[in-house]
Structure formats: C-alpha cells, structure tokens
Amino acid sequence: MDAYGHLRILVSLILGLAITRVLSGLSRRLQEPAKTGRMHVQIVWSFVLLLGAVHFWWWEFALRFISHWNFWIYIFVLSYASLFFLMSTLLYPDHLHEHTDREDFFIRRRNIFFVLFGLSFAFDLVDTLIKGREHLAALGIWYGVRLVAGIGVAIFAVKTEDSRRLTWLGIAWLAGNIVWITMLYGGLD
C-alpha cells in the first residue's frame, strides 16, 4: 500500500466519526423534538460541518499526486481531519445535564468551535501548498477570497452571541460554499 492509501484509511475513520456524530445529533432532533426545540444555530452549522467534511475528503483526493511523504505531512493531514471531529463534539457533546439547553451550550462554546473553524482555513492553505504551487495556482483568486472570508466568518462568530445572526451567518456560508464547490469541481480530474 502506498503512503496515500495508508493515510486515506485513517482520514476516513476520523471523518467518519465526525460525520456520524453530526448525523446522530441531527437524528436526535427528529427523535426527541420537544428536547431539541430551539436548535436552529446547531442545525445550520451541522450542515456546514457535514458539507465541510465531505468537501475535505474530496479535497484530499489531490494528495495522491504527492510523491514524497514524511511523518510530519502525515501528522499534519491527520490533524487537519481531526479539526472536523473536534468541531462535531462541540456541536453535539457527549454529555449534557438534563436541564441544559443544547442551543445555549453551543452559544457558550461557540468561541472554541469558531476558533477551530477559523484554524481550518490556515490548515487548508498549508495543505494546498503541500500539494504544490501548481495546485494553488489552479484554484485561482477565489480560493484566497474563500480563505479570508472563512477567517472573517470565524472572527465575527466569536464576537457575537446572537443566535439569529449566527444562524444567518451559517446559511450564508453554506450557500457560498455550495457555489464554490459547484464552480470548482466537475470531476475528480
């Protein structure tokens, strides 16, 4: 097995855990609507995170072109994938007290969530540079705009406690990401 194939397995496990946690959290809303009533921010950012994790997996397909691997690149890519799992645990924590509102918990923990969200864009840039300057050039100017916008979203989200603003911010980011992914990817080429 080549280095990329070996890495792909572990990245799949980490992303699978993140996706499973988010999907389980969303399914809980369907199962217990009375307990999960006011979770609009969580729901929107769950979809942002799901799309982000799937996009990350697609994005990492370009790692197959790297011919020289070392341990630190391996650790870096695993750390990048782990950001998605850590964000999923902040959206849907393991244990909440019976009387704790999930939305309030997320709002209280939003700083950590959005710091990780912002950090993912720094990881994204390094990951892109690892894939080569040609790969970076092929992404065009909108790649840089997306990185700056993502960091801007993270900074704004850390500074606001208004769940309605965070919900609309998530919807706007989700819509922008859908446009970005649609424009950028037509196939695995």
Image (cartoon, rainbow, N blue to C red):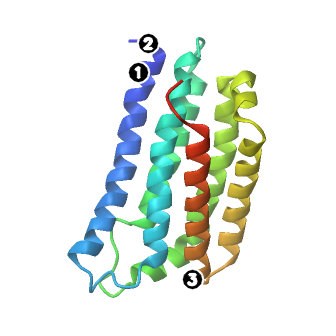
State the SS at label 2. loop
Residue at 44%, 25% in the rendered image: 7
Pick whichever, 100 or 15, lies toward us. Answer: 15
Residue at 52%, 49% in the rendered image: 83
Expressed as whole percent of the image width and height from the top left, the position of residue 108 reads 54, 78
Asked if residue 110 lies left or right of residue 23, the reply is right
Name the amino acid type tagged 1: His
Q: Residue furthest left?
A: 31
Pick whichever, 19 or 96, lies toward us. Answer: 19
Q: CA distance from mark 2 to mark 1?
A: 6 Å
Name the amino acid type tagged 2: Asp
Mark 3 is surrounded, within 10 Å at the Cα level, by few (under 14), some (14 to 19) or many (20 or more) other residues, namely: few
Residue under numbered circle 2: 2
State the SS at label 3. helix
Residue under numbered circle 3: 164
Residue 84: mark in rendering: none
Residue under numbered circle 1: 6
Expressed as whole percent of the image width and height from the top left, the position of residue 129 reads 71, 29
Asked if residue 68 lies left or right of residue 42, the reply is right
In this rendering, the answer to whether 96 lies above or below 23 is: below
Residue at 54%, 40% in the rendered image: 79
In this rendering, the answer to whether 39 lies above or below 88 is: below
Mark 1 is surrounded, within 10 Å at the Cα level, by few (under 14), some (14 to 19) or many (20 or more) other residues, namely: few
- Look at the numbered discs 2 and 1 and tell me whether their residues touch, using CB distance below 8 Å: yes
Quadrant of the rendering where the C terminus is positioned: top right
Q: CA distance from mark 3 to mark 2?
A: 47 Å
- Look at the numbered discs 3 and 1 and tell me whether their residues touch, using CB distance below 8 Å: no
Mark 2 is surrounded, within 10 Å at the Cα level, by few (under 14), some (14 to 19) or many (20 or more) other residues, namely: few
State the SS at label 1. helix
Disc nearer the start of the sequence (3/1): 1
Name the amino acid type tagged 3: Arg
User: What is the quadrant of residue 97 in the picture?
Assistant: bottom left
